[in-house]
Amino acid sequence: MLPPLDYLKGWVFMKICTLASSSSGNCTLVSQGSTHILIDAGISLRRITASLRQFGISPDELQGVLITHEHSDHISGIKMLVKYHKIPVLAPLGVAEALCGTLPEARDAITWFQAGTEFVLGEIAVRSFLTPHDTPESVGYRFDTDRSSLVFATDIGCVTQTILDAALGAHMAVIEANHDIRMLKCGSYPMYLKRRILSERGHLSNDDSGRLAVRLAASGTRKIVLAHLSRENNTPRLAYDTVGGALQRQGAAVGGDIELETAPPDCMGRVYIV
């Protein structure tokens, strides 16, 4: 198990960048000073290495890869990443057990923790929290330094009190806006898949994401990135307009009070400083 949270050092700002965010692959970089963490590794080692190079970072400088759950679009790059680099892969116990079965080659690199506990990686305090998704266990993450905070919550079928307890008050949030409900219902997906996505263990709709964004903004969040958008059942414009409209109806000025953007699916997004 990982050591418990005791104290936190550091003074520089936290930087966040999505390297990929879609059902084809997910990977996000969180950095503070010399501390660099990946959330998921669902893209190739080649893409991870090329993206990190733009920050002047090599994979060997990563403090770890935090896994949200074991779906392939979140773990497909792990096998090669740990084959060529000594990087710890950190996951809650249930996810870690699934990873050991799926990726026995990575077994020695995997470190487990109990979902809901806090620990420190370098200069960043990390807290995991349970999320509802169609896997035996799934988590989101909150990152805190002495001056800023980030919450990361995608692949969630609904917004639970556990998610709110972790997310409210964060300076920045990366949250899911997976689908437009009408597009999904009228689209070509088979009925079983539509039901799965719409369920409380599926994915968050634009409307639900808007309601979450309103709660976040009321708690002090000032930067929101919409992530894991479906190519088939959503568009960046629809997601932005739906969530932005919900914020504006509650009196939040998008582009003023709140910075709102969508994460690109297959390439690096903007670098956010929090």
Image (cartoon, rainbow, N blue to C red):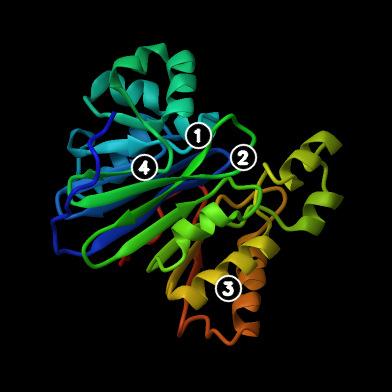
> Of label 1 and label 3, which has the lower sequence position?
1
Q: In the image, residue 135 lies at what x, y percent? A: 60, 31
> Of label 2 and label 4, which has the lower sequence position?
4
Count up the numbered dots: 4
Q: Nearer the viewer, mark 2 or mark 4?
A: 4
Say if residue 271 shows up in the picture.
Answer: no
Alpha-carbon neighbours of circle 2 within 10 Å: few (<14), some, or many (≥20)?
many
Residue 133's disc is 2
Identify the residue under disc 1: 69
Judge whether 8 appears above or below 220 on screen. above
Q: Nearer the viewer, mark 4 or mark 1?
A: 4
Judge whether 142 appears above or below 241 on screen. above
Q: Are the residues at dot 1 and dot 2 in contact (C-beta closer than 8 Å)?
A: yes
Q: Quadrant of residue 92?
A: top left
Quadrant of the image containing the N terminus: top left
Seen in the image, is 238 located left or right of residue 181?
A: left
Identify the residue under disc 4: 117
What type is the residue that disc 4 sits on? Answer: Thr
> Of label 1 and label 2, which has the lower sequence position?
1
Spatial CA distance of label 2 from label 3 is 22 Å
What type is the residue that disc 1 sits on? Answer: His
Indicate the secondary structure of the residue bearing disc 2. loop
Q: In the image, residue 130 lies at what x, y percent? A: 51, 43
Q: Are the residues at dot 2 and dot 3 in contact (C-beta closer than 8 Å)?
A: no
Spatial CA distance of label 1 from label 3 is 26 Å
> Of label 4 and label 3, which has the lower sequence position?
4
Seen in the image, is 129 located left or right of residue 250?
A: left
Q: Nearer the viewer, mark 4 or mark 3?
A: 4
What type is the residue that disc 2 sits on? Answer: His
Residue 214's disc is 3
Q: Quadrant of residue 181?
A: bottom right
